[in-house]
Amino acid sequence: MTAISFEGVNQTYMTKSGETTALQEIWLDIQEGELIGLVGPSGCGKSTLLSLIAGLLKPTNGTVQLFGKKVAGPSPDCGYMFQQDYLLPWRTILDNVLIGPEITGTVTPALRQRALHLLDELGLSDTASKHPHQLSGGMRQRVALGRTLLTEPRVVLLDEPFSALDYQIKLQLEDLIAETLKARNLTGVLVTHDLGEAVAMCDRIVVLSNRPGRIKRVLEVPHSIRELSPLEARENAEFHNLFRMIWGDLQDEY
Ligand SMILES: Nc1ncnc2c1ncn2[C@@H]1O[C@H](COP(=O)(O)OP(=O)(O)OP(=O)(O)O)[C@@H](O)[C@H]1O
C-alpha cells in the first residue's frame, strides 16, 4: 500500500522580503513499511517535505496524500522525532512519554502500561521515575522515540534525530530505530546530512537538488546492505559504491 504520495508538489514561501521556492515538481510514492532517506544541500527543502507530510504546511501546488487521503492538517498517523528530544525537565521519564495523551486528556491505565512496556522494549525500564537530566543524550533520544511510538503513528518523520549524538551512540540508535520501525511495519522518512547514515538505515534514498529542491535521483539500497547492522554496513563494498554515487550527485549541487 502507498503510505505517502507527492503529486506535482511545489512549495513557495511568501515573506516580507519576497518569495522563496523551496520545492519544485515533487512526484514521489513511498510504500508502507519503507524507510526513505532524504539527502540534499542545505536549504533544498528536506524539512519542508516533512512539514508537508505532517500537515503543518499546505502545498502551494499539487497534493500530498497519506494512505490515500489528501493531507489537510496534522494527523495522528504521523509522529515526529527531531534533533532535540524536547523532554520536559520537570517531568519524569514515564510522564514525558505520556505527554501526548495527557495533552489530549486520554491517559488510561492501559496507556500507562503501554508506556512502561515501550520503555522496557527500548532498554529504559529502570528510568521510568527518573528525570531527563539523569539520562545520557542517547537515552533521552530513546525516550523521545517511546513518546513518538506511544500514540501508534503509522508514519514516523525523523528530522536529523542523531546529529547531536556521539558517533558510537548514533550507530546504536540508528540500528534501534531502523529495527523498531521494521518490526512494526511503520513507514519512516529520515532527513539527514550524513550520507552513511542514510545508506546504512534506509530502503531508498531520495537525492534532492539545490534549491528549489527537485528530485535528482532515487536510489534503491540493496538488500545485502539492509540486512547488516549500521556498523557492518559501513564495512561493505556496496555501501561504499552507493555512498560514492550519492556523494557525486551532491558535489554537482555545491
Ligand atoms: N517558514 C519559512 N518562511 C520562509 N522561508 C522558509 C521557511 N521555511 C523554510 N524556508 C526556506 O525554504 C528553503 C528550504 O528550507 P528547509 O528548511 O526545508 O531546507 P532543508 O533542506 O531542511 O535545510 P537544512 O538542510 O539546512 O536544514 C530555505 O531557503 C529556507 O530558508
Image (cartoon, helix red, strand yellow):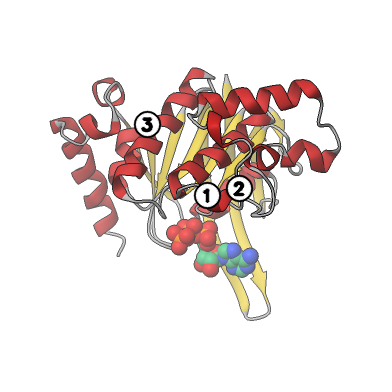
Query: Mark 1 sits on what residue?
Result: 134
Quadrant of res 3: top right
Residue 80 vertical placement versus 40 (above, below): above
Residue 103 vertical placement versus 17 (above, below): above
| Mark 3 residue crowding within 10 angstroms, few (<14) / some (14–19) / many (20+) | some
The residue that appears at 24% across and 50% down in the rendered structure is 247
* Residue 159 image point, x, y percent: 50, 49
Considering depth in this image, is 233 or 133 the residue closer to the camera?
Answer: 133
**Mark 1 Cβ inside 8 Å of ligand 1:** no
- Residue 220 seen in render: yes
Query: Mark 3 sits on what residue?
Result: 175
Distance from disc 3 to disc 2, alpha carbons, whole Å, reads 25 Å
Circles 1 and 2: CB atoms closer than 8 Å: yes
Mark sitting earlier along the chain (3/2): 2
| Mark 2 residue crowding within 10 angstroms, few (<14) / some (14–19) / many (20+) | some
**Mark 3 Cβ inside 8 Å of ligand 1:** no
Amino acid residing under circle 3: Asp
Of labels 3 and 2, the one closer to you: 2
**Horizontal placement of 87 versus 246: left or right?**
right
Quarter holding the C terminus is bottom left
Query: Mark 2 sits on what residue?
Result: 131
